[in-house]
Amino acid sequence: MALDIGRRRLRRAVDEARRQHRRTPSVLIVGGGLSGLGMAIQLLRSGITDFTVVEQSDGVGGTWRDNTYPGAACDVPSHLYSWSFAPKCDWSRKFAGQPEILTYAEDCVERFGLAPHLRLGTTVEDATFDERSGRWRVTVTAAGAGHEVLEADALVLACGQLNRPWTPELPGRDEFAGPAFHSARWDHGVDLAGKRVAVIGNGASAVQFVPPVAAAAESVAVYQRSANYVGPKPDKAYGPFQHWLLQHIRPYELAYRWSIYWRFEARWLAFRKDSWSGRTLTRLMTKGIREGVVTDRMPAEVVIPDYPVGCKRILISNDWYPTILGPTVEMVTDPIERIEPGGVVAGGRRRPADVLVYGTGFHTTDFLAHVPVTGRDGRTLASVWASGVRAYRGTTVAGFPNCFLLYGPNTNLGHNSILFMVERQLNLVLQSLALQTETADADSVGSVEVTGEAFDRDDADVQRRVRQTVWVAACHSWYKTASGRVTNNWPSWTVAYWAEMLRLPRRDLTVTTPRRAREPVSTP
Ligand code: NAP
């Protein structure tokens, strides 16, 4: 689903460099989730074989390895939530569940021969750009081994936006006597049968796990801070005929994938601030909830959001409302006062609980705060981001040569597939690697860095567009910081991002050849 510009250009540059006995770049990828694996596949397809994927857990899959909670699934159809360069034609259903998506990630390792490049169970401690050699030095620790320093010409940080679970500092949190765990660290050893379960949060994860939990438990109390818009999930299983068509008729598979893409893309209309589509969708969804869900037992203020649709992620589920209307589920909207060993106190009332589940989301707006990354002149990413996390096209930061983020700042979406966005970022990384290769000599490769001017201009442009989106409305969401800066979402059509990411403009870059001791040879 790409014009494949970056991969073709890198392939040509690599072939040329090999003919002339010049170096090609080595790459270190941090993170073995879908983004890290996508990068690895595209490197191999471009002829780059000197790369390593460092992954802290004991397997690939990232968020799809972490989130094993009951009911975990993707709310983007799987034919679009998979790489266009690694299509899977036999998805069992439209919205595949977590086990099938994890298997897809593992199959990619097998299918593209990535295993020799993986270093699992290896944690990155820090990453530093060595200005003398023009290479990245990355300290890693593997279980049972000491520190080790890995070096590479380029660094790709594929750590994602949703990888560090967040648990609120509620009074008495550590005194709870029973099992307590976060949805992204589900404790499958806990048998919920006959248990009273307290669930904190009602976001995208909770909407998926509360129905199966309620089916098993004696009772569930959901502690909700604000209501969500929950629409129907048009899920279906694929039959053998559709599998056959998808597997054997490539134009059909492509048309199917693109039809999902364009239908999802059209939803952007509702995400623009005060748009007619947004107001209409808000009215329709509110009407649907009022007519189908609100009863004497379920007052409107519990289930009807007080903000426009899209301000927070729009959720889809066919069993959320039937579950919360059921006799064993209670929605608690009073703020939590404290956790006690045997229950949760909210609105002055103590509700007993045997198990506590946090569906409270992730650390989302501070991105790589947990990994010290140091670029030129000893400047850290944390210091550059002190006034707000940002990146040029969500992918690279001035002062950090040959360093890239995948699913970085302002690249998340509320209306389409993240993997589509990451494919655009892969294209940009491959173009930058092509430039490094084109300027390489026999011993070392060149260096590519976005200029400070382009970095600032791009951020100003993104934040200007953000102000025209529904995300700036009055709602609490993981897309923005406490001060209201939207750090996570791309504020436009994905087609606009695609157009911007087709080519890496040379005027926005400082390209340095190895021979000239990192003197800029091409500046704007
Ligand atoms: P989330 O959407 O951030 O939801 C966190 C929930 O915890 C919210 O309901 C929030 O309330 C609540 N909360 C936080 N602090 C609280 C407190 N002190 N007291 C009471 N409630 C509190 O997190 P998530 O459900 O894990 O989902 C995160 C993201 O992961 C999603 O938006 C989505 O992008 C991704 N995800 C995707 C899928 C998928 O199908 N593709 C599935 C699961 C997750 P407020 O709403 O009031 O802030």
Image: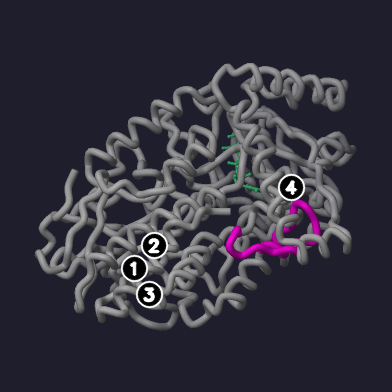
Q: Mark 1 and mark 4 in contact (Cβ < 8 Å)?
A: no
| Residue at disc 1, CB closer than 8 Å to ligand 1 | no
Compared with 180, 240 (above or below) is below
Q: For numbered disc 1, what is the local secondary structure?
A: helix
Label placed on residue 9:
2
Instruction: Give the residue number, with chain letter if any, for mark 1.
Output: 13
Alpha carbon of mark 4 to alpha carbon of mark 1: how far?
Answer: 46 Å
User: Can you tell which of label 3 and label 2 is closer to the viewer?
Assistant: 2
Please give left or right for residue 182 compared with residue 163 in the image. right
Alpha carbon of mark 3 to alpha carbon of mark 4: how far?
Answer: 35 Å
Q: Mark 2 and mark 4 in contact (Cβ < 8 Å)?
A: no
Q: Quadrant of residue 154?
A: bottom left
Observer able to see residue 356: no
Q: Residues within 10 Å of mark 1 (few under 14, many from 20)?
A: many
Instruction: Give the residue number, with chain letter if any, for mark 3.
Output: 141
Query: What amino acid does circle 1 point to?
Result: Ala
Image quarter where ligand 1 lies: top right
Query: What amino acid does circle 3 point to?
Result: Thr
The residue that appears at 39% across and 83% down in the rendered structure is 145
Q: Which residues are magenta?
A: 83-101
Label placed on residue 208:
4
